[in-house]
Amino acid sequence: MSLLRLEQLSVGYQRPILSNLSLSLSAGEILGLGGSNGCGKSTLLKAISGEARIFSGTIYKAPTLNIRLQKQHPIRLANFPLSAREYLALMSAQIAHLPTRLAQLLDRRLDSLSGGQFQLLSIWACLATDSDVVLLDEPTNNLDRLGITLLLEMLNQRRPEQGIALISHDHEFVHAATTRQVDLSPFHQSDIEAL
């Protein structure tokens, strides 16, 4: 079942960065979005979640579709007295089946976590909700090999009806994590083409 369908989509900010892109995301699928730096991968995820401009084309999705976006650098306020447990509750994320490595962090303040610990906690906060679609922008940021292994386990344990689209420059991770890959480079609207 298709959760999202993009048809002839052109997205960007002041001008289109990606143009004439058509693709779909199905339930249970993990779609890897690749391409050269600056080709519009993050912009596409932001357009799907409503944070970037759609110049033309259509995004077809159910009106009740719940989308979660994990940005490249998840927001973590310094000196904010919030525990990991409170953060997950605020994000409406379940703690049942929380991996042991993350469960050990539940009573620690967010500002005491390493970048990798917070990255994994933020990804769990997207996956362990009622989200239908999860968009992950560079989910391996700040992660060591053990963190990447845990991330792969988390993705494998997701709800089977979720669809995930992710971006990563770690090609080994992309091939291990995804069920399909799409190169966005051919859809990039360069400055020369825009003139």
Image: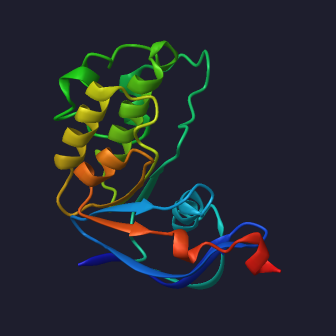
- Tell me if residue 41 comes above or below residue 87 in the rendering: below
Q: Identify the residue at horizontal 63%, vertical 58% (top origin).
A: 38
Q: Identify the residue at horizontal 26%, vertical 61% (top origin).
A: 162
* In the image: residue 47, left or right of residue 172: right
Q: Identify the residue at horizontal 67%, vertical 74% (top origin).
A: 189
Q: Is residue 5 visible?
A: no
Furthest residue toward right: 195
- Tell me if residue 27 comes above or below residue 174 in the rendering: below
Please state the horizontal and vertical placement of residue 167, each as a whole percent of the image. 44, 54
Camera-nearest residue between 176 and 96: 176
Residue 151's image quarter?
top left
* In the image: residue 128, left or right of residue 64: left
Colour scheme of the rendered structure: rainbow
Camera-nearest residue between 161 and 119: 119
Please state the horizontal and vertical placement of residue 15, each as a whole percent of the image. 76, 73
* In the image: residue 97, left or right of residue 190: left
Q: Quadrant of the C terminus?
A: bottom right
Q: Identify the residue at horizontal 19%, vertical 54% (top origin).
A: 159
Total number of numbered labels?
0
- Tell me if residue 135 comes above or below residue 58 in the rendering: above
Please state the horizontal and vertical placement of residue 134, each as a whole percent of the image. 37, 56
Q: Is residue 164 visible?
A: yes
Q: Quadrant of the N terminus?
A: bottom left
Please state the horizontal and vertical placement of residue 183, each as a whole percent of the image. 44, 68
